[in-house]
Amino acid sequence: MAKALPRRNHLQEEQRARTRRLIVDAALRVFAERGYVGSSIEHILVAAGVSRAAFYSHFDGKLAVVRAIAQDFEPVWHPVFAYLAQLRDPGLPELTEWATRHLDMHRSHQETCTLLTQVAALEEALYWEVSAQRDAIVTMLAGRHRAFERATRDNDVMLEARILLWGVDQACFHVVRQHLPDPSKRAAEIIASQMKAFLDKHGG
């Protein structure tokens, strides 16, 4: 009997993981349809097909689900900046390729990007978590790019880096959502030129 316990615990862990995934996936659909403010826990329960008790065994409310979505999204956005970190003395073509990847990420994950952008503007807790992620990006890029390394030592340069990264994310969001029309398909090049200006200015 004692040998069956680890197997049972493993099955329970798998069931918990499946339930969490059901809730997170359902919540993303509900938020996309109704918006964060217009969505309720009840809407998520119905979409996920889980009980209230099951929901609260994982999350304490809507914001907790969004924070989980943000955490689960890290493996998506991280490679985009890992690519930038690997570039050595990049020119405009290389940076344009990076910006194109950033835009493509937003296109492929519009629902998640829209949700996180909206909720970060409403919920301070998520805002600071997203800000911490941007600071982690600065640290990642500091290992290869002198401008970002300088940002880790100079508060004024760090402010520029934060504004740059925030602006890149906002630009991608609004271009993909077509709030900023891009009929000539120059958005990636414009974003790349802004990154290059920062790297050139502080890379000396």
Image (spheres, rainbow, N blue to C red):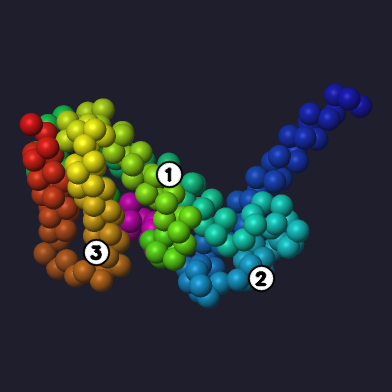
Asked whether the viewer can see residue 115, the reply is no
**Mark identifier at residue 175:** 3
Amino acid at circle 3: Val
Task: Looking at the picture, tell me which residue is in the foreground, 78 or 37.
Answer: 37
Q: CA distance from mark 2 to mark 3?
A: 33 Å
| Residue at the (77%, 35%) spot, across then down | 9
| Tag 1–tag 2 contact (CB < 8 Å) | no
Give the residue number, with chain letter if any, for mark 1: 74
* Direction from residue 40 to residue 67 in the image, left or right: left
Amino acid at circle 1: Glu
**Mark identifier at residue 42:** 2
Q: CA distance from mark 1 to mark 3?
A: 21 Å
Q: Secondary structure at mark 3?
A: helix
Task: Looking at the picture, tell me which residue is in the foreground, 133 or 88.
Answer: 133
Dot 2 crowding, Cα within 10 Å, few <14, some 14–19, many 20+: few
| Residue at the (33%, 52%) spot, across then down | 105
* Direction from residue 139 to residue 148 in the image, left or right: left
Instruction: Say which quadrant the N terminus sits in.
Output: top right
Dot 1 crowding, Cα within 10 Å, few <14, some 14–19, many 20+: few
Q: Which region of the structure is painted magenta?
A: 104-114
